[in-house]
Amino acid sequence: MPESLLESGSEFDRTKVLLARWLRENAESTRVLTRDELSALGTDRRFAAGWRVDIETASGVQPFRVLIDERFPYSPIRVASNTADHYLRHPHVEPGGLLCLPRRPAPTAGIEQAIVTALSDALALVGEWEDPVVVKAEFQREFVSYWNRGKDKGATPIRSLLDATNKHTRRIAVWFGDGYTLAGETSQQLLSWLKNRGRSQESKVVPGAFIYLDEPPVLPFPQRPGELFAMLQQHAHSAAALLAQLPAQGDLVLVAQAPSPSGDGLIGMTISTPKNFDGFRKSNRLRPQAKFALWKMKSDLGRTSIDRFDSAWIHGRGLNRDQRRLEASTALILGCGSLGSQVAHRLAQSGVGRLVLADPEQLSAANVGRHALGIDSVNMNKAAALAGTLRLHFPHLQQTDDHPISWQSLYDQNPEIFERASVIVSCLGEWSADGQLGEWHARQSGAPPVVYGWLDEFGTASHAIVLSGTGPALGCVLGPDGTLRTPETLWNRDGLVQAEPACGTLFQPYGPIDAGLAEALVSRLCLDVLTGKAKVPCHRVHAGSTSQLMEAGGQWSADHLKYRPTGFEGPFGYERPLDVCGRCQSCQNPR
């Protein structure tokens, strides 16, 4: 029978005894809370023990409840007010009267210090409640949390695609779905998002309003449309003019944004007007005064939460300085195999706004173990299946196109795709394809930079190279047979490329960890190129451990050992110099 984490002799049991002893010796009075009292706290958190204590202060006796859960002493001591009435009436109070105190080290460092600190923090917080200026400031600091806690029961949340950097009150587009409401800048944006998410049926988009408040709302929040309009009149002067232009019937979604010391926050509201009402013309062409009168007399105001689904929030919570630049970039990825698929996925996660994928091959089951796609995509074209997955997972991206053809065919049919790319990423994995791409790139004038990525034998090292089209060419790095002119690894046996018992089934034997290391190397270089942080040209290398190489039957080259720290046998990354070789075709026959 498994032992209980709370049994006699456990760390929980030992520290609980120490805490109870300290409370008895130092509090004005102490009483152990009953199981019913613990259950009546009305929170999702399960408390294992608690005490009702009276703490003597200069102004009198202050009652608290001291609580510990089943993870104690690895979880903090919690303190609650002696009544739940403080919830949504005072700042930093959670359901059940739990006080939201500053985060402190776990009590494992010392029970006495932990309880003294917790009670001191609790007394300081309760003392702040006496100052209305402090109370207002604290409510405004975390106004989104208080708004969401007081939202209507069963309210439909809003998913926002809105540009939070645009602080102008304006008309927006709204779509009502099952389980959520979608708000965006335009109907086109919403329809594109829904299409990427796989919605094929026609979607009706209606107008809504975005309102910027000059300061956050504080409790008590508006309960009726009239109270909302009074708040808007004081803190959003242009809101009335916008609302007067919107339909008076049905559900009108309002998204409000306000500044706070922690950054701008979004809150949601819905003005719901019944379809049948007396005393007003049943038309959306009411005069502004009649609309506001209708809303005040016949409508309900619902409060709801907002989840940000916009690119700036998903890719950095609004703090990524490179986000807008990445969102405006286009990455053309040639080859969607084990490396290219992972790079495409990582660039999408990083917020690159437009991805164009090209690969003529189908996914095989043998490749699933190191590919971004799973078993459901076997026998599907890699580029098409990957693009569909990325659209589904990242519907906010501006464009994800697929071309189930070779890069040469894509160039013959649509050369403008290459011209418009911010970066071309070659994960082709074959010299016959990479070599021709390198030759083409060296002949172009003004072509975008090309990033090449590949792995050495058995995944023992990986490479990422970026070339600009001027200066060194791919032939300066790879010889006429596609091997490195200055290799990282040396091999003295055959069988470096494996084959299945079928025609044309050669493959490199490396696993998902090796592919992941190469993906990180190539993806990082792509992002550095797109954000102007990489010098071009450059050659980055990730070398595996010496034991991995020796186990595979290889050894480090003399050139590699120039960069490997003396006596170090683990994996590491470094950057090689990349210069014009003077020997390759591109050097001998410059454009």
Image (cartoon, rainbow, N blue to C red):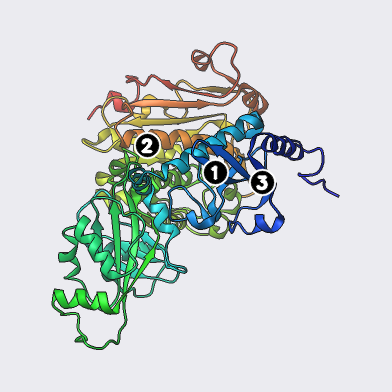
Q: Residue furthest top?
A: 566
The Cα–Cα distance between marks 1 and 2, rounded to whole angstroms, is 60 Å
Occupied quadrant, residue 75? top right
- Which badge, 2 or 3, is on the more N-terminal residue? 3
Q: Residues within 10 Å of mark 1 (few under 14, many from 20)?
A: some
Please tell me the numbered disc located at residue 62: 1
* Position of residue 525 measured from the top left corner of the image (x, y, whole percent): 39, 33
In this rendering, which labeled residue sits more in front, label 1 or label 3? 1
Task: Look at label 3 and name its amino acid.
Answer: Trp
Occupied quadrant, residue 551? top right
- Which badge, 1 or 3, is on the more N-terminal residue? 3
Q: Residues within 10 Å of mark 2 (few under 14, many from 20)?
A: many
Q: Secondary structure at mark 3?
A: strand
Question: Is residue 302 shown left or right of residue 324?
Answer: right
Task: Look at label 2 and name its amino acid.
Answer: Cys
Q: Quadrant of the C terminus?
A: top left
Q: Secondary structure at mark 1?
A: strand
Residue in the picture at 52% in, 41% down? 60
Residue in the picture at 37% in, 43% down? 131
Report whether residue 366 is seen: yes
Question: Is residue 410 shown left or right of residue 3?
Answer: left
In this rendering, which labeled residue sits more in front, label 2 or label 3? 3
Task: Look at label 1 and name its amino acid.
Answer: Gln
Q: Secondary structure at mark 2?
A: helix
Between 558 and 353, the one nearer to me in the picture: 353
**Vertically, is 72 above or below 166?**
above
**Vertically, is 444 above or below 218?**
above
Which residue was labeled with disc 3? Answer: 51
